[in-house]
Image: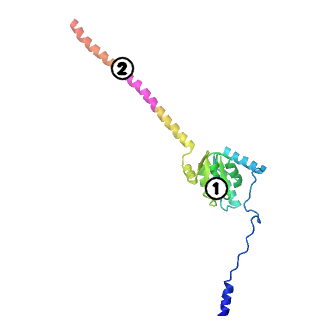
Amino acid sequence: MHILKQKLMAVTEYIPPPPAAPRGAYPSQSRKVKEGSPLVLLMKKEMGKVFQENKMVAVAQNNGCNAEDMMMLRHSLYKHDIRVRFFPNEVARLFLKESIYCNMTPLFMGPTILIVSKEPKVKEMLKTLRGSPQMTLVGGCIENTLLSVQGLQNYSKLPSVTVVQGELVSGLTMMTSRTASLLQRHPTHLSALLQQYIKQQSSDAGAEAAPKAEEAT
């Protein structure tokens, strides 16, 4: 029993963990960007140009998409005149906090990409992203309006501007033609009534003239 007790105590002996390294002993894993560096200023200016020239700016998270899949995604989007832009999250946050798009800052978490186009092509973008499961859409800005993923999906179901313009023109044309027909109908109807009234007056006058002629004879 004595030997077994010694073995048990040896097995269950407390071994303290190694002391932790002091703060600053290892380099920081997060890359810090200097706000005043020329490269950061250039990227901020380029990002502002992207927001200014494009009506659709969407943010998607890159969940392990390799270079080949990224190239295929960019090619598929380019067919619809949609482009992919890359900016560091630190630069994006620096730009957004000084712009009217500051509410988009929470979207830039982890590896992200920008999907932009000069015209809102949300339907084409969503259809293309369905073929890339590594890309997760997290939100976007359409014509200076911040939309969630559900908002982008609802926006994609709206008819295009061409369809709405066609429906508006057809509706206005129908209303104009109906108004013109109503305006033409009243003068025509009035003219017919006047002609009928004149004929009726002429027939009444002839009927009255006939007895007077008989009395004169």
Horizontal and vertical percent position of residue 124: 60, 51
- For residue 1, say whether it is visible: yes
The residue that disc 1 covers is 60
Residue drawn at 75 percent across, 48 percent down: 41
Closer to the camera in the image, 55 or 103:
103
Q: Which residues are magenta?
A: 178-194
Label 1 SS: strand
Disc 1 versus disc 2: nearer the observer: 1
Q: Is residue 87 visible?
A: no
Q: Mark 2 belongs to which amino acid?
A: Gln
Q: Cα distance, mark 1 to mark 2?
A: 76 Å
Q: Which mark is residue 13?
A: none
Residue displayed at 52% across by 37% down: 169
Viewer-closest of 62 and 190? 62
Question: Residue at 33% of width from left, 18% of height from top?
Answer: 199
Q: Residue furthest top?
A: 217
